[in-house]
Image (cartoon, rainbow, N blue to C red):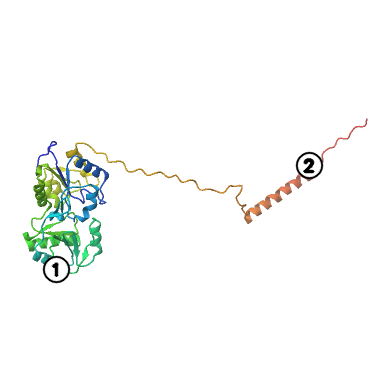
Amino acid sequence: MTELNGKKEIRVIVLDVDGTLLDSKHALTPRVEAALNAASAKGVQIVLATGKTRTSMLKIIEELKIKSPGIYLQGLAIYDEYGELRHQQTLDPAIARQVITFGEDRSFIMVAYSGERILSRVYNKEVSEGLTDYHELEPEVVGPLQNLLGSMSFNKLIACGDAKAIKALRWQLNLQLGGSVRLMQAGIPTMLEIMPPGGSKGTALRQLLKDMKVAPENVMAVGDAENDIEMIQLAGIGVAMGQSHQAVKDSADHVTGTNDEDGVAQVVEKFVLGELVTPPPAEAKPVVIEPPEETPDEATAAPVEPTKLEKAVESAEASAAAETVKASADTEPPEKVEEDSAP
């Protein structure tokens, strides 16, 4: 843990993506984007650190105009600013075979990550939608994953299933395999990640900072889940998101707002910019006032045929009026006519 110092120079900001950089709708908010753009303008490098493939991050890289290396697949792959793979870790093929068979025998859907490819034995709608919701590609259906182990390496495996069953699987695999794998959950209770031993975002960040020739004390790392703890502890300023579990908060120097409260923008403004950043106003849309609907002029409107009831009322009113006139004529005295007097 590093004592916070407002004068510490932050040269690199390392960001987890889902639950940190993006809000709960998996979107980049205007305030976060504005804060990171302002940091970039000051020469601060933005490094993404995610459990996903680099392909899933291309839109974010473009939106933020990131020209820095990145950490992917939970730290099992490091790509340079040009998208070239620089470092990677892979599972032992024998261990991978054992885990796949064990998981499938217990009805878990097993997914393999190999570089930028995501592979599965069969199509599963829930798993596929779960991955694409996080901007990943749909898994390629390739049949038995064990058959591929002779021709390609797997960086990691993911077991997908019921949250309670996943918890039990983690216990069972830990008991069977011990230190021969790293078991990790990235804030999703229905998924368990199986990785090579020692693989983590923290390990990858240490290697990346060595390549970049940047000291950890000049780094701010922000995350929200178990897989972020090591990089949070390594950084000069480690930040936990407001919605993080307590273990993550305990590992951090500072707790910021949630990902729906622009928590990343809050700490960038506080520790990097020293001021609040106002996002650019949204592009104004022209207001179109629709003219009122034209109504036919009363003078030219077609006459409306009276109903039978209206005709009957009119007839009764006319009869009553006629009777009244007749009665008046019978009762009133004749008008007196004055005779002319004789001369």
Of the numbered discs 2 and 1, the one sitting upstream in the chain is: 1
**As shown in the figure, which amino acid type bears the numbered disc 1?**
Gln
Circle 2 residue: 332
Q: Nearer the viewer, residue 177 or 231?
A: 231
Q: How many marks?
A: 2
Question: In screen coordinates, is 343 left or right of 197?
Answer: right
Question: In screen coordinates, is 338 left or right of 37?
Answer: right
Image quadrant for the N terminus? Answer: top left
The picture places residue 147, in percent across and down from the top left corner, at: 14, 69
Image quadrant for the C terminus? Answer: top right
The picture places residue 37, in percent across and down from the top left corner, at: 22, 43
Given the current orientation, which residue lies at the most extreme right position?
343
Give the residue displayed 78% in from the left and 45% down from the top: 329
Circle 1 residue: 146
Query: CA separation, marks 2 and 1?
Result: 120 Å
> As displayed, is residue 174 above or below residue 6?
below
- Dividing the picture into quadrants, the one containing residue 145 is bottom left
Give the residue displayed 76% in from the left and 44% down from the top: 328
> As displayed, is residue 188 above or below residue 98?
above
> As displayed, is residue 244 above or below residue 106?
above
Q: Residues within 10 Å of mark 2 (few under 14, many from 20)?
A: few
Q: Nearer the viewer, residue 1 or 206?
A: 206
Question: In screen coordinates, is 179 left or right of 16?
Answer: left
Q: Nearer the viewer, residue 280 or 226?
A: 280
Given the current orientation, which residue lies at the most extreme left position?
179
Single out the mark in the foreground, 2 or 1: 1
**As shown in the figure, which amino acid type bears the numbered disc 2?**
Glu
- Dividing the picture into quadrants, the one containing residue 98 is bottom left
Q: Nearer the viewer, residue 107 or 196?
A: 196
The picture places residue 331, in percent across and down from the top left corner, at: 78, 44
